[in-house]
Amino acid sequence: MPSPSELELFLKFKSQIEFGISLMTLNITNGPPLNCFVIFSMLLSNLSVVTFSLANIMLNFEGKLTTNSVFSCVTCIGALQIVLKALSVCSYENHFLQILMWAQSLYNERTNSEEINEMIRKILLQFHRIWIYIFKLFFWLYILSGLALCVINALMGDEGVIFRCPFISLDYQYYLEVMHLLQLILIMFAILSTVYADSSLIFLGLHIMAALDILNEYITLHKNRMEVNKNFIENVLKRYCDLVDNIDLFNEAISILSFVQFITSTILFLFVFCAVTVDSNNPIGHVIVVCSMIQLFLPCLFGEVVKIKTDRLSETLYMINWYNLSVTDQKSFLILLGVMQKTYGLKAAGMYNITLYTFIQIVKLAFTYCAVLLNLNSY
């Protein structure tokens, strides 16, 4: 079985993933009081970002796109995306926790073959390391981008104020200082909520990918010794059904969330591209382009990989020496092969495939709308 170090590594991050799931599903009634307070604070901060950004747009917009108005739109759409995504999955917390428990069971799995145990251990460790790298990339890229945005806005003075708080008078002596400090706090809260919520989804998704690889390698290792393992077909079918159940569970939970992600990302890309075009000398616009694209690219990449890996399972199964089996086992094998030929992928709202092609289409659509908006802005 996997050595204790792998299981300990999982347990080390389990509480963080559970917090991310609670944050993502807005669970402010269960769990430690501190976690509930943090989740409520992050929800309140995101709603404040939406409100204060809209207030700034309504106050300063004069019919032409400016750097200030565009960045206000970007922060408004970004915070609104976080809130809408949370609302779309607030009733699916048990789905995510069930998948998390299933992921933990992968670490507790035992077989009579040391070769298979070592294979499971290596695959789980590999995907766990991938998640750690992605989390660190997410965390530092988003934090540094948010800090850079706030610092540059502070240096710009009043032009850098992308929030307007209705409760603070414009005549207040330290108005600029207060608004820039408020921007820093609210933007950091929004970034942290995004990082922890999205990284929890990525964690679950990577373990689904790990389970697909484990099943594929399990089939490959038994390629020439099916006669020895009399329970091979039964074991493969059990693993496959267990895996498909969790893919369906994950797909059901993120279906509306992915649809919200697609719509809001299209609008977000639109204003981010406008920000880069309106003020091409501002490096923050380019950084936000990278951050927003990574956020959409990763789930689309995951959907693409799941589709490819499920397709590969039936191909791997077909290549084993099944023709040496008895007639009864051959019939069972062909039934199993027929079951595994179905392609399983992720869909947004049950209609739109979550693939790299969808990612490209969203970027192209945002570019088109951006060109139209900038053309109208030139008149």
Image (cartoon, rainbow, N blue to C red):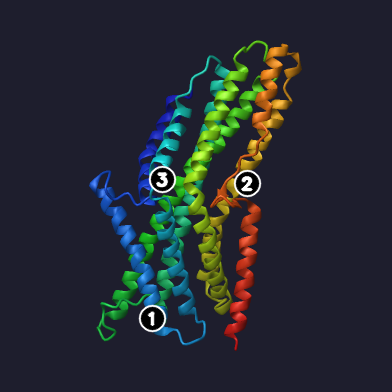
Task: Please name the residue shown 31% across and 62% down the image.
Answer: 44
Q: Tag 1's secondary structure?
A: helix
Distance from disc 3 to disc 1, alpha carbons, whole Å, reads 43 Å
- Of callouts 3 and 2, the N-terminal one: 3
- Near-viewer residue (152 or 229): 229
**Nearer mark to the viewer, of 3 and 1:** 3
Hey, which quadrant is residue 81 in on the image? bottom left
Label 2: how many residues lie within 10 Å, few (<14), some (14-19) or many (20+)? some
Q: Secondary structure at mark 2?
A: helix
Q: Is residue 86 above or below residue 167?
A: above
Q: Is residue 14 above or below residue 106?
A: below
Work out whether mark 1 precedes mark 2 in sequence or the reverse, and give the earlier one: 1
Query: In percent of the image, x 45 and y 55: which residue is there?
Result: 140
Q: CA distance from mark 3 to mark 2?
A: 23 Å
- Mark nearer the N terminus (3 vs 1): 3
**Pointer 3: what residue?**
92
Quarter-of-image position of residue 108 = top left
Q: Could you tell me the amino acid type at mark 3? A: Tyr
What percent of the width, then of the height, locates residue 144? 44, 61
